[in-house]
Amino acid sequence: MLTPNLSAGEQRQLANSLTAFLSRYRHLSDSYVIEFFTEDLWQALPPSWRPVLQELTYPQIADLLLDQHGDRRYPSAWPLSLLAFRAAAHALAFPRGCGREREGVAASAAPAEFPSSLLGHAFRRHVKPKKQHEIRELGSLVKRLCERTGCSSVVDVGSGQGHLTRFLSFGLGLSVTAVEADPVLVAMASRFDRQLVLALEKEQQKKNCSSSRLAAPKSPPRHVTGWVNPKASWEAFVQQLKHRTQTSLDSDAHPQVSSGEPGGGSCESSPPGSPDFVLTGLHACGDLSATLLRHFVGCPHALAITSVACCYMKITTQEDPTPPGPVGRPFPPAAGQESPPFQFGYPMSSWVRGLPGHQLSYKAREGACHAVEDYVRRLREESVLLRTHCYRAMLETLIRDRRPDLRRAGVQTGKRAHFLPFAEYARLGLARVGLPPGAPLDPAWAESTLRQQVRVVAFFSLSLLLAPVAETLVLLDRMIYLQENGVDSQLVAVFSPDLSPRNLVLVALKALKGPGSEVGAKALKGPGSEAGTKGLKGPGSEAGTKGLKGPGSEVGGQGV
């Protein structure tokens, strides 16, 4: 499903509305549910919201609050401010449903097998169903972009174990260079490539196939072990792609590590075929997605890009330049080389950077990674997992009683800790942070506090409702950045959100020259330009602004 086809002015207007809305409810997006009791977060909600929220059942929270299309039978009259909050949150967020879901296909159904029956089990080896779904859908989209641009070379950055690379190369016949920073993953990818080739050869012999139905790649995948330096230029990135490496079919591949610095390493061989390429990154973590977009804008050889982001909390910002988790710079600067000024992962665009209230805290960015669909499913099932947040918030109270300076400590109590009685959970949790159990737990306090679980769940659901809105602002900022640099783009809900929460793919093409060529993102649309297995557009997925508007909710902010 396509996101609404917004003009440059509408993109800026939407960014204004998003920053205004998120600024107004920053106390929700920046709150930690584990501090529900220690910070008395329930009292921070508007007084008119509390009575209606605490009377809801878990399925009602799912239907009336989180699910845009849920059952709207209200058990009591809701305050207009709460209704407006919910309506604005749904209206401002980019739609996440893919075309298949709009056709009524069960989202929990297992992904279909890959197009070539010859790939079958051999191709799915080592690949979990979620990843199978992602590489099939994204691979088909990349293939369509290659056809549109007339380019058969693909650069897959953050390639990991090479699952997408193998599908693009052996499944779709493209020439692929895979870039991965972890040499262990690169070695695994090369080994899996060889295993696939052997399995396919055995399958052909077993079936007495005289000719393969496999889309033979122009060359085997090339695996480059290298860190994509966010401070390096696009020229250094292209040079990095030329570093000497062995193909995946060599028996002992030990690719030379590339730093992404100009002049570093050996450059004895270049990627086969045309110097032009299509750039892709499946769930490129933190600043890597932003770095790839900057390289795409600057590099004349990069004709198109598909960007699937993840780990927004690892994005650098001016307020948080060193968030926990981003990959650090593993190599010193080359002799005589000076890195260009560092550019933050958010905001990328000049427009969003100039908006008051555009800042997104670490907590807001971390919340943008949460899976709303998964939590809705838990609510409807009234899962025992819903107890987790209340348990942890109660434990935070006990920790603060013993160590007031110890805030939001990481506590690992086990995967099935929510099945334990709270007294046992508390004993384990205190031990994990090095605290003695102290006095016996007051049963009356534990019982009365546990009765507030529905409040904890309702509060968390309010903050969760803001997660897609924060994600929309991050992705819209990237779209505006591309537009500021003369490149049209569009977001496509390629994956099922139930299988892959980060399911929005940012797709961009540069202006194509030549007779009959369409310009920019327009090349994605039109008769016969479907991407993936059913195209960028699915039945009922209008490209206009209808996806942003609900009854009475205007994009310009009147619904806010």
Image (spheres, rainbow, N blue to C red):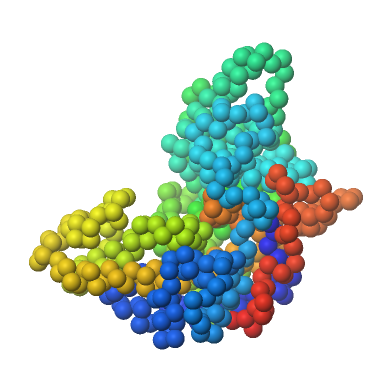
Vertical order, 414 against 241 (above or below): below
Answer with the quarter of the image where residue 209 lies: top right
Quarter of the C terminus within the rendering: bottom right
Image location of residue 521, percent across then percent down: 75, 58
Residue 134 visible in this rendered orientation of the protein: yes
- Name the side, left or right, on which 395 lies relative to 246: left
Vertical arrangement, residue 258 with respect to residue 96, above or below? above
In the rendered image, residue 159, in percent from the top left (x then y), is placed at: 54, 42
Query: 224 or 308, which lies in front?
Result: 308
Work out whether residue 433 or residue 85 is closer to the camera in this orientation and state it.
Answer: 85
Q: Does any portion of residue 66 appear in the rendered image?
A: no
Q: Residue at x 57, y 66 (%)?
A: 70
Q: Is residue 47 left or right of residue 407?
A: right
Answer with the quarter of the image where residue 267 lies: top right
- Is 32 on the left-hand or right-hand side of 437? right
Q: Residue at x 56, y 42 (%)?
A: 110
Q: Residue 486: x and y, percent?
A: 73, 64
Q: Position of residue 98 (x, y in %)?
A: 64, 55
Residue at the (57%, 30%) spot, across then down: 123
Total labels drawn: 0
The residue at 73%/59% (across/down) is 540
Question: Is 300 placed above or below 156 here?
Answer: below
Is 436 located above or below residue 445 in the figure?
Answer: above
Q: Quadrant of the N terminus?
A: bottom right
Q: Nearer the viewer, residue 465 or 83?
A: 83
Viewer-side residue, 166 vs 291:
166
Most distant residue in the left direction = 439
Instruction: Single out the residue that lies furthest toward the right.
Output: 515
